[in-house]
Image: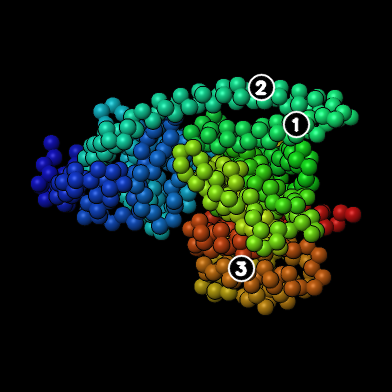
Amino acid sequence: MISPRDPETTASSGVVIPGLGEALLTMAEVGAERQSLAEVGAAVDESLQGIMHLPNLFIALIDEHPPRLRFVYCRDVHDRHADRPIDGLGMTDRVYLSRKSLLLRRETANELLAAGELVNHGVPSKVWLGVPLWSGKRIVAVMATQDYEDSQNLTEWHEACFKAVAPTVAGLVDRAIGWREEHDGSARESEVLKQKQALFATVGHDVRSPLAVIQGYSDLLRETLKESSSALTAERVFKAAQELSAATERMLDYTAAEAGARDHAPEITELGGWMRSLESWLESWGENQGVGVACQMTATGGEHARVDAEWLRQLLQHVMRAGIKANGVSRVRLRLKVQPVVTIPAGLLRLSFAFEALPSPGALTPPGSPDVRLRPVRLDDGRTYDGVTVSLAIAKRLAEMVGADLKVSEGYNAPWRATIVTTVPAVIQLQSPDGEDQGAALSIMRKQLQQDAGRMVVLDANPDTRLESVRVVSEAAGAAPEVVGSVRELTARLRGKQVGVIVAAVEQDSMAVREIALAMRSVDGLAVLPYLVVISPDQSPAGVESLLDSGADAYLPRPLNGAAVLVALSNAWVEFERRTELNSAP
Protein backbone atom coordinates (compact mmCIF):
# COMPACT_ATOMS: atom_id res chain seq x y z
CA MET A 1 0.00 0.00 0.00
CA ILE A 2 1.33 3.46 -0.89
CA SER A 3 1.89 5.73 2.07
CA PRO A 4 0.63 9.24 1.29
CA ARG A 5 3.32 10.78 3.49
CA ASP A 6 6.35 9.30 1.72
CA PRO A 7 8.13 12.16 -0.09
CA GLU A 8 9.22 9.70 -2.78
CA THR A 9 7.25 6.65 -3.79
CA THR A 10 8.03 3.76 -6.13
CA ALA A 11 5.08 2.65 -8.24
CA SER A 12 4.35 -1.05 -8.75
CA SER A 13 6.05 -0.94 -12.15
CA GLY A 14 9.33 0.06 -10.50
CA VAL A 15 9.18 3.68 -11.70
CA VAL A 16 10.28 6.22 -9.08
CA ILE A 17 7.90 9.20 -8.81
CA PRO A 18 9.32 11.97 -6.59
CA GLY A 19 6.71 13.83 -4.56
CA LEU A 20 3.92 11.34 -5.28
CA GLY A 21 2.91 10.85 -1.64
CA GLU A 22 2.66 14.57 -0.97
CA ALA A 23 0.64 15.12 -4.16
CA LEU A 24 -1.82 12.36 -3.26
CA LEU A 25 -2.28 13.78 0.24
CA THR A 26 -2.88 17.30 -1.10
CA MET A 27 -5.25 15.95 -3.73
CA ALA A 28 -7.30 14.05 -1.17
CA GLU A 29 -7.44 16.92 1.35
CA VAL A 30 -8.33 19.64 -1.17
CA GLY A 31 -10.65 17.39 -3.17
CA ALA A 32 -12.58 16.41 -0.04
CA GLU A 33 -13.46 20.07 0.51
CA ARG A 34 -14.70 20.61 -3.05
CA GLN A 35 -17.99 19.11 -4.06
CA SER A 36 -18.58 19.79 -7.76
CA LEU A 37 -16.87 17.77 -10.47
CA ALA A 38 -15.29 20.92 -11.91
CA GLU A 39 -13.80 21.80 -8.50
CA VAL A 40 -12.49 18.26 -8.04
CA GLY A 41 -10.87 18.47 -11.50
CA ALA A 42 -9.19 21.74 -10.53
CA ALA A 43 -7.87 20.15 -7.30
CA VAL A 44 -6.46 17.19 -9.23
CA ASP A 45 -4.88 19.50 -11.82
CA GLU A 46 -3.31 21.65 -9.11
CA SER A 47 -1.84 18.63 -7.32
CA LEU A 48 -0.47 16.99 -10.49
CA GLN A 49 1.43 20.15 -11.39
CA GLY A 50 3.60 19.46 -8.32
CA ILE A 51 4.81 16.23 -9.91
CA MET A 52 5.02 17.04 -13.63
CA HIS A 53 4.35 19.80 -16.15
CA LEU A 54 1.02 19.22 -17.91
CA PRO A 55 0.16 21.79 -20.63
CA ASN A 56 -3.41 20.43 -20.84
CA LEU A 57 -5.67 18.21 -18.74
CA PHE A 58 -9.25 17.00 -18.91
CA ILE A 59 -11.55 14.56 -17.12
CA ALA A 60 -14.38 13.00 -19.15
CA LEU A 61 -17.25 11.43 -17.21
CA ILE A 62 -18.81 8.24 -18.64
CA ASP A 63 -22.60 8.22 -18.99
CA GLU A 64 -23.80 4.71 -19.79
CA HIS A 65 -27.47 5.34 -20.69
CA PRO A 66 -27.03 6.40 -23.43
CA PRO A 67 -23.24 5.92 -23.83
CA ARG A 68 -21.84 9.46 -23.74
CA LEU A 69 -18.76 11.46 -22.71
CA ARG A 70 -19.26 14.52 -20.51
CA PHE A 71 -16.19 16.72 -20.07
CA VAL A 72 -16.65 17.85 -16.47
CA TYR A 73 -13.20 19.45 -16.28
CA CYS A 74 -11.13 20.81 -19.17
CA ARG A 75 -8.01 22.95 -19.33
CA ASP A 76 -6.85 22.97 -22.94
CA VAL A 77 -5.23 25.65 -25.09
CA HIS A 78 -7.24 24.70 -28.20
CA ASP A 79 -10.18 22.35 -27.73
CA ARG A 80 -13.53 23.20 -26.21
CA HIS A 81 -14.23 19.45 -25.71
CA ALA A 82 -17.97 19.38 -26.37
CA ASP A 83 -19.93 16.52 -24.81
CA ARG A 84 -20.59 13.79 -27.37
CA PRO A 85 -21.80 10.19 -27.81
CA ILE A 86 -19.23 7.42 -27.48
CA ASP A 87 -18.59 6.32 -31.08
CA GLY A 88 -15.56 4.12 -30.44
CA LEU A 89 -13.32 6.18 -32.76
CA GLY A 90 -12.03 8.85 -30.38
CA MET A 91 -8.95 8.39 -28.21
CA THR A 92 -10.96 8.82 -25.00
CA ASP A 93 -13.38 6.19 -26.32
CA ARG A 94 -10.50 3.77 -26.88
CA VAL A 95 -9.37 4.10 -23.25
CA TYR A 96 -12.90 3.41 -22.00
CA LEU A 97 -13.61 0.50 -24.36
CA SER A 98 -10.17 -1.15 -24.03
CA ARG A 99 -10.25 -0.65 -20.22
CA LYS A 100 -6.57 0.28 -20.12
CA SER A 101 -4.29 3.30 -20.44
CA LEU A 102 -3.22 4.71 -23.81
CA LEU A 103 -0.07 6.63 -24.78
CA LEU A 104 -0.43 7.59 -28.45
CA ARG A 105 1.97 9.62 -30.58
CA ARG A 106 1.01 11.44 -33.77
CA GLU A 107 2.77 8.97 -36.11
CA THR A 108 0.70 6.05 -34.81
CA ALA A 109 -2.44 8.21 -34.72
CA ASN A 110 -1.99 9.10 -38.40
CA GLU A 111 -1.86 5.41 -39.30
CA LEU A 112 -5.09 4.75 -37.38
CA LEU A 113 -6.71 7.77 -39.03
CA ALA A 114 -5.77 6.56 -42.49
CA ALA A 115 -7.19 3.11 -41.68
CA GLY A 116 -10.48 4.62 -40.51
CA GLU A 117 -9.98 3.30 -36.95
CA LEU A 118 -9.65 6.74 -35.37
CA VAL A 119 -11.37 10.14 -35.71
CA ASN A 120 -10.01 13.51 -34.56
CA HIS A 121 -12.72 15.00 -32.37
CA GLY A 122 -10.64 18.13 -31.82
CA VAL A 123 -7.35 19.77 -32.79
CA PRO A 124 -4.75 17.01 -33.36
CA SER A 125 -1.94 16.84 -30.80
CA LYS A 126 1.64 15.55 -31.06
CA VAL A 127 1.15 13.09 -28.19
CA TRP A 128 -1.87 11.98 -26.12
CA LEU A 129 -2.08 10.14 -22.79
CA GLY A 130 -5.19 8.85 -21.02
CA VAL A 131 -6.02 6.46 -18.16
CA PRO A 132 -9.34 4.95 -17.00
CA LEU A 133 -10.68 5.89 -13.56
CA TRP A 134 -12.19 2.80 -11.90
CA SER A 135 -14.85 2.70 -9.20
CA GLY A 136 -15.28 -0.92 -8.21
CA LYS A 137 -15.80 -2.86 -11.42
CA ARG A 138 -16.93 0.13 -13.45
CA ILE A 139 -15.02 2.89 -15.26
CA VAL A 140 -16.58 6.18 -14.13
CA ALA A 141 -14.33 8.56 -16.10
CA VAL A 142 -11.20 8.98 -18.20
CA MET A 143 -8.40 11.38 -17.25
CA ALA A 144 -6.19 12.53 -20.12
CA THR A 145 -3.59 15.05 -21.19
CA GLN A 146 -2.03 16.02 -24.52
CA ASP A 147 0.75 18.16 -25.93
CA TYR A 148 0.40 20.07 -29.21
CA GLU A 149 4.06 21.11 -29.51
CA ASP A 150 6.45 18.42 -28.20
CA SER A 151 5.87 14.74 -28.96
CA GLN A 152 8.46 13.74 -26.31
CA ASN A 153 6.91 15.72 -23.45
CA LEU A 154 4.73 12.77 -22.42
CA THR A 155 6.50 9.42 -21.86
CA GLU A 156 6.03 6.06 -20.16
CA TRP A 157 7.07 7.79 -16.91
CA HIS A 158 4.08 10.14 -17.19
CA GLU A 159 1.87 7.12 -17.90
CA ALA A 160 3.12 5.49 -14.68
CA CYS A 161 2.36 8.72 -12.78
CA PHE A 162 -1.18 8.80 -14.15
CA LYS A 163 -1.74 5.16 -13.18
CA ALA A 164 -0.44 5.85 -9.67
CA VAL A 165 -2.83 8.75 -9.01
CA ALA A 166 -5.80 7.24 -10.89
CA PRO A 167 -7.33 5.39 -7.86
CA THR A 168 -7.30 8.59 -5.76
CA VAL A 169 -8.78 10.66 -8.61
CA ALA A 170 -11.45 8.01 -9.23
CA GLY A 171 -12.43 8.15 -5.55
CA LEU A 172 -12.77 11.94 -5.65
CA VAL A 173 -14.82 11.79 -8.85
CA ASP A 174 -17.06 9.05 -7.45
CA ARG A 175 -17.60 11.08 -4.26
CA ALA A 176 -18.53 14.19 -6.27
CA ILE A 177 -20.99 12.16 -8.35
CA GLY A 178 -22.61 10.81 -5.19
CA TRP A 179 -22.91 14.31 -3.69
CA ARG A 180 -24.53 15.61 -6.86
CA GLU A 181 -27.00 12.73 -6.97
CA GLU A 182 -27.94 13.26 -3.33
CA HIS A 183 -28.43 17.02 -3.49
CA ASP A 184 -29.58 17.60 -7.07
CA GLY A 185 -31.68 14.52 -7.63
CA SER A 186 -29.66 13.67 -10.72
CA ALA A 187 -29.96 9.96 -9.96
CA ARG A 188 -33.40 10.15 -11.57
CA GLU A 189 -32.23 12.02 -14.69
CA SER A 190 -31.48 8.88 -16.70
CA GLU A 191 -34.88 7.36 -15.95
CA VAL A 192 -36.67 10.65 -16.61
CA LEU A 193 -34.88 10.98 -19.95
CA LYS A 194 -35.95 7.47 -20.93
CA GLN A 195 -39.53 8.30 -20.06
CA LYS A 196 -39.40 11.50 -22.11
CA GLN A 197 -37.93 9.67 -25.08
CA ALA A 198 -40.68 7.05 -24.87
CA LEU A 199 -43.28 9.80 -24.65
CA PHE A 200 -42.05 11.68 -27.71
CA ALA A 201 -41.87 8.46 -29.69
CA THR A 202 -45.69 8.30 -29.61
CA VAL A 203 -46.95 11.80 -28.82
CA GLY A 204 -46.29 13.06 -32.34
CA HIS A 205 -48.71 10.53 -33.81
CA ASP A 206 -51.31 11.08 -31.07
CA VAL A 207 -51.36 14.85 -31.63
CA ARG A 208 -50.64 15.21 -35.34
CA SER A 209 -53.15 12.63 -36.54
CA PRO A 210 -56.30 14.46 -35.27
CA LEU A 211 -54.82 17.76 -36.45
CA ALA A 212 -54.42 16.31 -39.94
CA VAL A 213 -58.10 15.28 -39.87
CA ILE A 214 -59.13 18.79 -38.76
CA GLN A 215 -57.07 20.31 -41.56
CA GLY A 216 -58.53 17.98 -44.15
CA TYR A 217 -62.15 18.60 -43.17
CA SER A 218 -61.59 22.37 -42.86
CA ASP A 219 -60.17 22.38 -46.41
CA LEU A 220 -63.15 20.33 -47.63
CA LEU A 221 -65.53 22.71 -45.86
CA ARG A 222 -63.83 25.72 -47.44
CA GLU A 223 -64.14 24.24 -50.93
CA THR A 224 -67.78 23.25 -50.38
CA LEU A 225 -68.86 26.66 -49.09
CA LYS A 226 -66.68 28.90 -51.26
CA GLU A 227 -69.70 30.14 -53.25
CA SER A 228 -72.01 30.54 -50.25
CA SER A 229 -72.51 33.25 -47.65
CA SER A 230 -70.45 31.20 -45.18
CA ALA A 231 -67.33 31.27 -47.37
CA LEU A 232 -65.53 33.81 -45.15
CA THR A 233 -66.24 31.74 -42.02
CA ALA A 234 -64.96 28.56 -43.71
CA GLU A 235 -61.80 30.37 -44.83
CA ARG A 236 -61.13 31.55 -41.29
CA VAL A 237 -61.61 28.03 -39.92
CA PHE A 238 -59.16 26.69 -42.51
CA LYS A 239 -56.49 29.28 -41.67
CA ALA A 240 -56.97 28.74 -37.93
CA ALA A 241 -56.44 24.98 -38.44
CA GLN A 242 -53.22 25.68 -40.36
CA GLU A 243 -51.93 28.03 -37.67
CA LEU A 244 -52.80 25.54 -34.92
CA SER A 245 -51.00 22.76 -36.77
CA ALA A 246 -47.88 24.90 -37.30
CA ALA A 247 -47.82 26.04 -33.66
CA THR A 248 -48.24 22.47 -32.44
CA GLU A 249 -45.39 21.27 -34.68
CA ARG A 250 -43.10 23.97 -33.30
CA MET A 251 -43.90 23.29 -29.66
CA LEU A 252 -43.55 19.51 -30.06
CA ASP A 253 -40.16 20.01 -31.71
CA TYR A 254 -39.07 22.43 -28.98
CA THR A 255 -40.16 20.16 -26.13
CA ALA A 256 -38.45 17.17 -27.73
CA ALA A 257 -35.25 19.20 -28.16
CA GLU A 258 -35.36 20.42 -24.54
CA ALA A 259 -35.82 16.84 -23.34
CA GLY A 260 -32.86 15.66 -25.38
CA ALA A 261 -35.05 13.14 -27.16
CA ARG A 262 -32.52 12.33 -29.86
CA ASP A 263 -33.31 8.95 -31.36
CA HIS A 264 -30.52 8.87 -33.95
CA ALA A 265 -26.76 9.45 -34.05
CA PRO A 266 -24.29 10.93 -36.57
CA GLU A 267 -23.64 8.64 -39.52
CA ILE A 268 -21.19 8.62 -42.42
CA THR A 269 -22.87 10.76 -45.10
CA GLU A 270 -21.88 11.49 -48.69
CA LEU A 271 -22.24 15.28 -48.71
CA GLY A 272 -22.87 15.73 -52.43
CA GLY A 273 -25.91 13.44 -52.46
CA TRP A 274 -27.15 14.83 -49.15
CA MET A 275 -26.97 18.39 -50.54
CA ARG A 276 -28.95 17.44 -53.62
CA SER A 277 -31.68 15.81 -51.53
CA LEU A 278 -31.63 18.81 -49.16
CA GLU A 279 -32.01 21.22 -52.08
CA SER A 280 -34.99 19.28 -53.44
CA TRP A 281 -36.63 19.16 -50.02
CA LEU A 282 -36.08 22.90 -49.40
CA GLU A 283 -37.58 23.87 -52.76
CA SER A 284 -40.65 21.70 -52.05
CA TRP A 285 -40.94 23.15 -48.55
CA GLY A 286 -40.71 26.73 -49.89
CA GLU A 287 -43.42 26.03 -52.45
CA ASN A 288 -45.74 24.85 -49.67
CA GLN A 289 -44.96 28.03 -47.72
CA GLY A 290 -45.60 30.27 -50.71
CA VAL A 291 -42.03 31.57 -51.01
CA GLY A 292 -39.34 30.95 -53.61
CA VAL A 293 -36.18 29.14 -52.48
CA ALA A 294 -32.83 29.56 -54.23
CA CYS A 295 -30.09 27.13 -53.14
CA GLN A 296 -26.38 27.27 -53.87
CA MET A 297 -24.61 24.13 -52.70
CA THR A 298 -20.85 23.70 -53.10
CA ALA A 299 -19.07 20.38 -52.60
CA THR A 300 -16.23 18.88 -54.60
CA GLY A 301 -18.00 15.53 -54.81
CA GLY A 302 -17.22 12.26 -53.08
CA GLU A 303 -16.73 13.95 -49.70
CA HIS A 304 -17.89 11.88 -46.74
CA ALA A 305 -18.46 13.15 -43.21
CA ARG A 306 -19.82 11.84 -39.95
CA VAL A 307 -22.86 14.10 -39.59
CA ASP A 308 -26.34 14.05 -38.07
CA ALA A 309 -28.11 14.95 -41.32
CA GLU A 310 -31.66 14.77 -39.95
CA TRP A 311 -31.01 17.19 -37.09
CA LEU A 312 -29.24 19.60 -39.43
CA ARG A 313 -32.27 19.49 -41.73
CA GLN A 314 -34.59 20.27 -38.82
CA LEU A 315 -32.29 23.08 -37.71
CA LEU A 316 -32.45 24.65 -41.19
CA GLN A 317 -36.21 24.23 -41.31
CA HIS A 318 -36.74 26.16 -38.07
CA VAL A 319 -34.31 28.91 -39.08
CA MET A 320 -36.22 29.33 -42.34
CA ARG A 321 -39.55 29.34 -40.50
CA ALA A 322 -38.28 32.24 -38.39
CA GLY A 323 -36.94 34.10 -41.43
CA ILE A 324 -40.07 33.96 -43.56
CA LYS A 325 -42.08 35.60 -40.78
CA ALA A 326 -40.44 38.93 -41.75
CA ASN A 327 -42.92 41.33 -43.32
CA GLY A 328 -43.24 41.00 -47.09
CA VAL A 329 -40.78 38.13 -47.63
CA SER A 330 -41.25 36.70 -51.09
CA ARG A 331 -38.16 34.51 -51.51
CA VAL A 332 -35.28 33.06 -49.53
CA ARG A 333 -31.72 32.22 -50.44
CA LEU A 334 -29.59 29.51 -48.87
CA ARG A 335 -25.88 28.90 -49.50
CA LEU A 336 -23.98 25.90 -48.17
CA LYS A 337 -20.19 25.74 -48.39
CA VAL A 338 -17.96 22.81 -47.48
CA GLN A 339 -14.35 23.54 -46.52
CA PRO A 340 -11.67 21.15 -45.24
CA VAL A 341 -10.25 22.34 -41.92
CA VAL A 342 -7.60 19.84 -40.82
CA THR A 343 -6.62 16.96 -43.10
CA ILE A 344 -4.13 14.57 -41.53
CA PRO A 345 -5.40 12.77 -43.65
CA ALA A 346 -8.75 12.23 -41.91
CA GLY A 347 -9.75 15.44 -40.21
CA LEU A 348 -12.62 17.90 -40.12
CA LEU A 349 -14.96 19.52 -42.61
CA ARG A 350 -16.46 22.94 -41.94
CA LEU A 351 -20.09 23.23 -43.07
CA SER A 352 -21.32 26.81 -43.30
CA PHE A 353 -24.96 27.66 -44.07
CA ALA A 354 -25.88 31.25 -44.99
CA PHE A 355 -29.60 32.03 -45.10
CA GLU A 356 -31.27 35.28 -46.27
CA ALA A 357 -34.96 36.19 -46.28
CA LEU A 358 -35.43 38.68 -49.12
CA PRO A 359 -38.43 41.04 -48.96
CA SER A 360 -40.46 42.28 -51.90
CA PRO A 361 -39.83 45.89 -53.01
CA GLY A 362 -41.71 48.36 -50.81
CA ALA A 363 -42.57 45.79 -48.15
CA LEU A 364 -40.00 46.81 -45.52
CA THR A 365 -41.10 47.58 -41.96
CA PRO A 366 -40.91 51.36 -41.21
CA PRO A 367 -38.71 52.42 -38.28
CA GLY A 368 -40.55 52.41 -34.95
CA SER A 369 -43.37 50.13 -36.05
CA PRO A 370 -43.97 46.98 -33.96
CA ASP A 371 -42.60 43.72 -35.25
CA VAL A 372 -44.39 40.68 -33.85
CA ARG A 373 -41.31 38.55 -34.38
CA LEU A 374 -39.39 40.60 -31.83
CA ARG A 375 -41.81 40.28 -28.93
CA PRO A 376 -40.51 38.16 -26.04
CA VAL A 377 -41.78 34.58 -26.07
CA ARG A 378 -42.67 33.34 -22.57
CA LEU A 379 -42.53 29.58 -22.02
CA ASP A 380 -44.46 27.49 -19.49
CA ASP A 381 -41.49 27.29 -17.13
CA GLY A 382 -41.26 31.09 -16.94
CA ARG A 383 -38.26 31.61 -19.20
CA THR A 384 -38.39 34.36 -21.77
CA TYR A 385 -36.69 34.51 -25.17
CA ASP A 386 -36.18 38.15 -26.12
CA GLY A 387 -36.05 39.06 -29.79
CA VAL A 388 -36.64 35.60 -31.22
CA THR A 389 -39.59 33.58 -32.38
CA VAL A 390 -40.45 30.14 -31.08
CA SER A 391 -38.95 28.71 -34.28
CA LEU A 392 -35.68 30.51 -33.62
CA ALA A 393 -35.68 29.34 -30.00
CA ILE A 394 -36.01 25.76 -31.28
CA ALA A 395 -33.23 26.38 -33.80
CA LYS A 396 -30.90 27.65 -31.08
CA ARG A 397 -31.55 24.58 -28.95
CA LEU A 398 -30.98 22.25 -31.91
CA ALA A 399 -27.76 24.11 -32.75
CA GLU A 400 -26.50 23.47 -29.21
CA MET A 401 -27.33 19.78 -29.53
CA VAL A 402 -25.38 19.31 -32.78
CA GLY A 403 -22.50 21.59 -31.74
CA ALA A 404 -23.24 24.31 -34.31
CA ASP A 405 -22.78 28.08 -34.01
CA LEU A 406 -25.97 29.97 -34.95
CA LYS A 407 -25.93 33.75 -35.48
CA VAL A 408 -28.84 35.95 -36.59
CA SER A 409 -28.77 39.56 -37.79
CA GLU A 410 -31.51 41.87 -39.01
CA GLY A 411 -32.02 45.59 -39.42
CA TYR A 412 -34.10 48.25 -41.07
CA ASN A 413 -33.86 48.15 -44.89
CA ALA A 414 -31.69 45.00 -44.68
CA PRO A 415 -32.53 41.32 -45.28
CA TRP A 416 -33.03 38.95 -42.35
CA ARG A 417 -29.86 36.82 -42.21
CA ALA A 418 -28.79 33.73 -40.31
CA THR A 419 -25.51 31.79 -40.43
CA ILE A 420 -24.92 28.28 -39.14
CA VAL A 421 -21.36 26.97 -38.86
CA THR A 422 -20.40 23.51 -37.65
CA THR A 423 -17.38 21.25 -38.01
CA VAL A 424 -17.88 17.51 -38.48
CA PRO A 425 -15.40 14.61 -38.71
CA ALA A 426 -14.38 13.96 -42.30
CA VAL A 427 -14.06 10.44 -43.65
CA ILE A 428 -11.52 10.76 -46.44
CA GLN A 429 -11.44 7.80 -48.78
CA LEU A 430 -7.96 6.89 -50.03
CA GLN A 431 -9.27 3.91 -51.99
CA SER A 432 -9.28 4.00 -55.77
CA PRO A 433 -12.51 3.18 -57.68
CA ASP A 434 -11.18 -0.31 -58.46
CA GLY A 435 -10.73 -1.09 -54.78
CA GLU A 436 -6.93 -0.99 -54.88
CA ASP A 437 -4.93 -0.37 -51.71
CA GLN A 438 -4.07 2.99 -50.25
CA GLY A 439 -0.60 3.13 -51.83
CA ALA A 440 -2.06 2.70 -55.32
CA ALA A 441 -4.65 5.41 -54.65
CA LEU A 442 -1.93 7.83 -53.53
CA SER A 443 0.06 6.98 -56.66
CA ILE A 444 -2.94 7.87 -58.85
CA MET A 445 -3.25 11.21 -57.03
CA ARG A 446 0.44 12.04 -57.57
CA LYS A 447 0.29 11.14 -61.26
CA GLN A 448 -2.53 13.61 -61.81
CA LEU A 449 -0.81 16.30 -59.73
CA GLN A 450 2.38 15.97 -61.79
CA GLN A 451 0.44 17.11 -64.85
CA ASP A 452 -0.95 20.14 -62.99
CA ALA A 453 2.22 21.25 -61.16
CA GLY A 454 2.99 23.87 -63.84
CA ARG A 455 -0.20 25.71 -62.89
CA MET A 456 0.47 25.60 -59.12
CA VAL A 457 2.15 28.42 -57.15
CA VAL A 458 3.64 28.35 -53.64
CA LEU A 459 3.67 31.69 -51.80
CA ASP A 460 5.86 31.95 -48.69
CA ALA A 461 7.33 35.30 -47.67
CA ASN A 462 9.43 33.77 -44.87
CA PRO A 463 12.82 32.50 -46.14
CA ASP A 464 13.13 30.26 -43.06
CA THR A 465 10.04 28.21 -43.93
CA ARG A 466 9.94 28.61 -47.72
CA LEU A 467 12.29 25.70 -48.49
CA GLU A 468 10.27 23.36 -46.27
CA SER A 469 6.97 24.46 -47.84
CA VAL A 470 8.27 23.92 -51.37
CA ARG A 471 9.89 20.58 -50.46
CA VAL A 472 6.74 19.04 -48.96
CA VAL A 473 4.49 20.33 -51.76
CA SER A 474 6.95 19.07 -54.39
CA GLU A 475 7.13 15.62 -52.81
CA ALA A 476 3.35 15.41 -52.59
CA ALA A 477 2.78 16.58 -56.17
CA GLY A 478 5.70 14.69 -57.65
CA ALA A 479 6.90 17.87 -59.42
CA ALA A 480 8.18 21.30 -58.41
CA PRO A 481 5.64 24.15 -58.39
CA GLU A 482 6.45 27.79 -59.10
CA VAL A 483 7.53 29.83 -56.09
CA VAL A 484 6.90 33.49 -55.21
CA GLY A 485 7.92 35.46 -52.14
CA SER A 486 5.30 38.20 -51.94
CA VAL A 487 1.74 39.10 -52.87
CA ARG A 488 3.09 41.53 -55.47
CA GLU A 489 5.00 38.71 -57.20
CA LEU A 490 1.87 36.55 -57.02
CA THR A 491 -0.22 39.26 -58.68
CA ALA A 492 2.32 39.54 -61.51
CA ARG A 493 2.32 35.76 -61.92
CA LEU A 494 -1.50 35.65 -62.11
CA ARG A 495 -1.37 38.02 -65.08
CA GLY A 496 0.58 35.37 -67.01
CA LYS A 497 -0.61 31.86 -67.77
CA GLN A 498 -3.46 30.35 -65.81
CA VAL A 499 -2.93 29.36 -62.16
CA GLY A 500 -5.20 26.69 -60.69
CA VAL A 501 -3.98 26.26 -57.11
CA ILE A 502 -2.15 28.61 -54.74
CA VAL A 503 -0.50 27.23 -51.59
CA ALA A 504 0.19 30.18 -49.26
CA ALA A 505 2.07 30.03 -45.94
CA VAL A 506 1.06 32.68 -43.37
CA GLU A 507 2.14 33.40 -39.80
CA GLN A 508 -1.15 33.30 -37.84
CA ASP A 509 -2.43 36.36 -39.70
CA SER A 510 -5.84 36.40 -41.35
CA MET A 511 -5.01 39.83 -42.84
CA ALA A 512 -2.40 38.16 -45.07
CA VAL A 513 -5.05 35.74 -46.36
CA ARG A 514 -7.45 38.63 -47.01
CA GLU A 515 -4.69 40.46 -48.94
CA ILE A 516 -4.09 37.38 -51.13
CA ALA A 517 -7.82 36.96 -51.78
CA LEU A 518 -8.16 40.62 -52.78
CA ALA A 519 -5.10 40.36 -55.03
CA MET A 520 -6.66 37.41 -56.89
CA ARG A 521 -9.89 39.33 -57.45
CA SER A 522 -8.04 42.45 -58.63
CA VAL A 523 -6.42 40.71 -61.62
CA ASP A 524 -8.26 41.61 -64.82
CA GLY A 525 -9.26 38.80 -67.13
CA LEU A 526 -9.02 36.07 -64.47
CA ALA A 527 -11.91 33.88 -65.61
CA VAL A 528 -11.72 31.39 -62.70
CA LEU A 529 -10.32 32.15 -59.25
CA PRO A 530 -7.52 29.78 -58.17
CA TYR A 531 -8.17 27.46 -55.24
CA LEU A 532 -6.38 28.89 -52.17
CA VAL A 533 -4.82 26.46 -49.66
CA VAL A 534 -3.42 28.21 -46.57
CA ILE A 535 -0.66 26.83 -44.31
CA SER A 536 -0.59 28.18 -40.75
CA PRO A 537 0.80 27.07 -37.38
CA ASP A 538 -2.40 28.29 -35.68
CA GLN A 539 -4.57 25.21 -35.10
CA SER A 540 -7.05 26.83 -32.71
CA PRO A 541 -10.70 26.66 -33.84
CA ALA A 542 -11.00 30.47 -33.79
CA GLY A 543 -7.78 30.89 -35.77
CA VAL A 544 -8.74 28.36 -38.42
CA GLU A 545 -12.23 29.86 -38.86
CA SER A 546 -10.69 33.34 -39.19
CA LEU A 547 -8.45 32.11 -42.03
CA LEU A 548 -11.36 30.45 -43.83
CA ASP A 549 -13.60 33.49 -43.38
CA SER A 550 -10.84 35.72 -44.83
CA GLY A 551 -10.87 33.91 -48.17
CA ALA A 552 -9.02 30.60 -47.78
CA ASP A 553 -10.63 27.57 -49.44
CA ALA A 554 -8.76 25.02 -47.31
CA TYR A 555 -6.38 24.90 -44.35
CA LEU A 556 -3.28 22.84 -43.54
CA PRO A 557 -1.46 22.93 -40.18
CA ARG A 558 2.26 23.41 -39.77
CA PRO A 559 4.37 21.32 -39.39
CA LEU A 560 3.26 19.89 -42.71
CA ASN A 561 2.24 16.28 -43.14
CA GLY A 562 2.92 14.77 -46.58
CA ALA A 563 -0.28 12.70 -46.75
CA ALA A 564 -2.34 15.71 -45.68
CA VAL A 565 -0.77 17.91 -48.38
CA LEU A 566 -1.39 15.25 -51.03
CA VAL A 567 -5.09 14.93 -50.14
CA ALA A 568 -5.52 18.71 -49.92
CA LEU A 569 -3.92 19.31 -53.34
CA SER A 570 -5.96 16.54 -54.94
CA ASN A 571 -9.19 18.05 -53.55
CA ALA A 572 -8.04 21.52 -54.64
CA TRP A 573 -7.65 20.50 -58.29
CA VAL A 574 -10.99 18.70 -58.30
CA GLU A 575 -12.68 21.87 -57.03
CA PHE A 576 -10.79 24.11 -59.48
CA GLU A 577 -11.86 21.92 -62.41
CA ARG A 578 -15.45 22.08 -61.15
CA ARG A 579 -15.27 25.88 -61.02
CA THR A 580 -13.89 25.93 -64.55
CA GLU A 581 -16.75 23.76 -65.84
CA LEU A 582 -19.36 25.96 -64.14
CA ASN A 583 -17.76 29.09 -65.61
CA SER A 584 -17.77 27.66 -69.14
CA ALA A 585 -21.37 26.42 -68.96
CA PRO A 586 -23.78 28.36 -71.22
Residue projecting furthest to the front: 229
Say what amino acid the circle numbered 1 marks.
Answer: Phe
Whether tag 1 and tag 2 are in contact, CB under 8 A, the answer is no
- The residue that appears at 57% across and 32% down in the rendered structure is 252
Say what amino acid the circle numbered 2 marks.
Answer: Pro
Say what amino acid the circle numbered 3 marks.
Answer: Val
Q: Which residue is mark 1?
A: 238
| First along the sequence among labels 3 and 2 | 2
* Residue 156 in sight: no
Measured from the top left, where is residue 360 in percent x and y? 79, 55
Mark 2 lies on a secondary structure that is helix
- The residue that appears at 11% across and 42% down in the rendered structure is 3
Mark 3 lies on a secondary structure that is helix
Q: How many marks?
A: 3
Q: Nearer the viewer, mark 1 or mark 3?
A: 1
| First along the sequence among labels 1 and 2 | 2
